[in-house]
Image: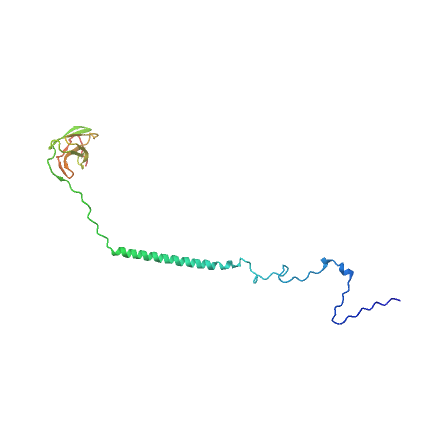
Amino acid sequence: MAADPEPVPEVEDGADRPLPVYDALLEFPESTRPDPEPYPGQGAWPAVPPAFHQPAAYPVAEEPEPRGRNRTVVAVVAGAVVVAVAAAVGVGAVLLNRDPAPPPGPAPTAAKPKVSGPPPGDLRLQDDTTTITVTWTDPTGGGVPFVVAGGRAGQKLGVMATVDAGQTRYTVNGLSPKLDYCFTVLAVYSTDTYATSGQVCTDREGGTTPN
C-alpha cells in the first residue's frame, strides 16, 4: 500500500508561498529563452517615420533664405552706389555747364619777313649739264649771309643751301642734263628782313620745261 503524500503546510492568506524547484528548469538552455520585448528607443525599436526624424543636414533647404537676403542687400547697396555716382556725375555736369568754355585765344602769328636792304647783284649761272654754279655780288662787302634757292623751271623754288657771309658762289650737283633749272639768291639781313635778287634760268638746247 502506497504511502500517503505529506501534506503541504498551509500558509496564511497574504503570505508568499515558496516556489517549487525543478532541476529541469535549472538546466534549461538560456539561448532558447524568448527575448524580452525591446524597450522603446532601443536599436530594435522600429525607426521613427521620416516625418518625425530628419537628418542633421535637413536645414539645407533653409539656405536660400539667407542667400536671398544677401543678394537683396547686395542689390540695394549696388543700387545706392549707382545712384550716388549718377548724382555725383550730374552735379559735376551742372558745375561744368555753369562755367562757359572760354573762347579760343588767337593763334600766335609768326612775324612776316619783310624786304629791306640792297639785294645781291649780277646773278649768273655756269651750266655744266649735271652741275650748275651760281655766282652773285655782295652789296654789303661780306656783312650778310645768303640763301640760294632753286628748282625745275616752271615749278616752285626751294631752299638749296645757306652760304656764309663773304661767299658769293655755290655749285649744285646731280642735275638732269635734259631739264632746265631756275635760281635766285637772298641776302639775309635779320631773322625777318631779307632782299631777293632776280631769277635766272638755264636755256639748254632741246631742254624741256615741266608743265
User: Residue placed at 40% from the left, 58% from the top?
Assistant: 75
Q: Position of residue 89 (x, y in %)?
A: 31, 55
Q: Is residue 19 left or right of residue 148?
A: right
In the rendered image, the vertical position of residue 111 relative to residue 89, given as above or below: above
Q: Position of residue 173 (x, y in %)?
A: 20, 29
User: Residue placed at 27% from the left, 56% from the top?
Assistant: 95
Q: Is residue 152 visible?
A: no
User: Residue placed at 49% from the left, 60% from the top?
Assistant: 62
Q: Position of residue 27 (x, y in %)?
A: 76, 58
Q: Position of residue 85 (x, y in %)?
A: 34, 56
Position of the C terminus by quadrant: top left
**Nearer to the camera, 3 or 171:** 3
Query: Quadrant of the rendered structure where residue 33 is?
Result: bottom right
Residue extending furthest right? 1
Q: How many marks?
A: 0
User: Residue placed at 33% from the left, 57% from the top?
Assistant: 86
Q: Is residue 75 visible?
A: yes
Position of the N terminus by quadrant: bottom right
Residue extending furthest bottom? 13
Q: Is residue 175 left or right of residue 63?
A: left
| Model colouring | rainbow
**Nearer to the camera, 24 or 10:** 10
